[in-house]
Image (cartoon, helix red, strand yellow):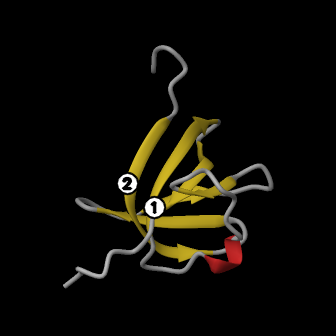
Amino acid sequence: SQQGGMPSQQQGTISTITPSTIVVQPLNGDPVTYTSSKSTVYVDETGKPVAVGTVQSGAPVVVYYDKTGGKTTATKVVVKKKTEIED
């Protein structure tokens, strides 16, 4: 029961991405599988559209999602720039 219509969001890194699903590994906890659809929007941090084909596993993302009918659907995926300072 979320108030004010704010979408839920999850930060993490892409574990697996296919045309129909996105699996995100959060900083803590188990991977989460989101359903993606033709209406799922992929953008970079400036809001420019990103081609899904360029999004690879390991990419840091913020997934905005909607839980309806037992499915967790990604509505928007913000793809962050990878920092070079990863161990």
Residue at coordinates 46% horizontally, 36% vertically from top-left?
8
- Mark 2 vs 1: CB contact within 8 A: yes
Residue at coordinates 75% horizontally, 55% vertically from top-left?
37
| Closest to the observer, 20 or 11 | 11
Q: Is residue 85 above or below residue 42?
A: below
Q: Residue furthest right?
A: 38
x and y, in percent, of residue 54 in the image: 64, 79
Quarter of the view holding residue 9:
top left
Which mark is first along the chain, 1 or 2? 2
| Closest to the observer, 46 or 63 | 46
Specify the amino acid type for callout 1. Answer: Val
Label 2 and label 1: CA atoms lie apart by 6 Å
- How many numbered circles does the render carry? 2
Residue at coordinates 51% horizontally, 55% vertically from top-left?
45
Specify the amino acid type for callout 2. Answer: Gln
Label 1 Cα neighbours within 10 Å, binned few <14 / some 14-19 / many ≥20: many
Residue at numbered disc 2: 11
Residue at numbered disc 1: 61
Kindly state the secondary structure of the residue where label 1 is placed: strand
Q: Quadrant of the N terminus?
A: top left
Q: Residue furthest left?
A: 87
Q: Residue furthest bottom?
A: 87
Q: Which of the labelled discs sits on residue 53, or is there none?
A: none
Kindly state the secondary structure of the residue where label 2 is placed: strand
Quarter of the view holding residue 67:
top right
Q: Quadrant of the C terminus?
A: bottom left
Q: Is residue 63 above or below residue 30?
A: above
Q: Is residue 36 left or right of residue 58?
A: right
Q: Is residue 16 above or below residue 28?
A: below
Q: Is residue 30 left or right of residue 43?
A: left
